[in-house]
Amino acid sequence: MKKTKQMSESYILGIILAVVGGYLDAYTYLTRGGIFANAQTGNIVLLSIKLAQRDIRKAVSYLIPIAAFAIGVLVAEFFKIKLKHSRLLHWRQLVIVFELILLFAAAFLPQGRADIIVTTTISFVCAMQVEGFRSINSNTVATTMCTGNLRSATQLLFYGIRNKDKKEIVKSFNYYGIIFFFMLGAVAGVVITDLIGVKSIIICSVLLMIPFFMMFKTKI
């Protein structure tokens, strides 16, 4: 029998979240002080560089989003435990609602002194997203970063070709597809932000409405 999957694991939902993930990284890097929203590895490297250069003030600007990301994971797990059996909304829908509201609010904070608030907020909600949506088509996939996806895609492609296994090859291209849409989101983030400015983040709030409504259908 064909295994029933959760709507939260659907590929189209993963694509939308990957576009949002790429968009947010481009947005914060371009408009909010060169800090990544999702790529905490990059932030940790930049934090280390600033510590080595004894630029404590700049180091703190990287440390705060890193801490916010960790807290976002904890909050997502709290939602999962407390709302796992909720009949009104799926706990992942609440994650999406929380994310789109905070992103919308961030659009109205000016550049400059408010940058650290925005990057912290976005790191927080991105952590909730990556923790809440870790599986696509029963495969572990990240929608806010690419390193793990690239490793998994290439490994699957290697063994798919080696073992002449078409299913493994298809899985590999699913991973590559998520990477592509993450990149597409980053490109869109650059183009739209150049046109609109800091309020361009509202686009992400609008996009997140799609997975929110999709999840009212629990099974696919």
Image (cartoon, grey):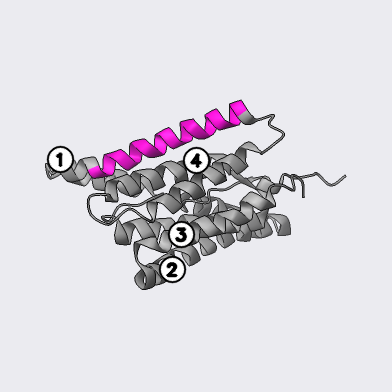
Q: Does 94 sit left or right of 75 as displayed?
A: right
- Say if residue 152 shows up in the picture: yes
The residue that mark 2 highlights is 187
The residue that mark 3 highlights is 202
Q: Is residue 66 above or below residue 182?
A: above
Q: Does 81 sit left or right of 218 as displayed?
A: left
Give whichever of 46, 111 is nearer the camera: 111
> Which residue: 41% across, 35% down?
70
- Tag 1–tag 2 contact (CB < 8 Å): no
Total number of numbered discs in the rendering: 4
Per the image, label 4 sits on a secondary structure element best described as helix
Choose the circle earlier in sequence order: 2 or 4: 4
Choose the circle earlier in sequence order: 3 or 4: 4
Residue at mark 2 to residue at mark 4: CA–CA distance: 23 Å
Choose the circle earlier in sequence order: 4 or 1: 1
Tag 2: Cα neighbours inside 10 Å, few (<14), some, or many (≥20)? some
Q: Which residues are magenta?
A: 61-82
Could you say which disc has been placed on residue 56 in the image?
1
The residue that mark 4 highlights is 128
Residue at mark 4 to residue at mark 1: CA–CA distance: 28 Å
Choose the circle earlier in sequence order: 3 or 2: 2
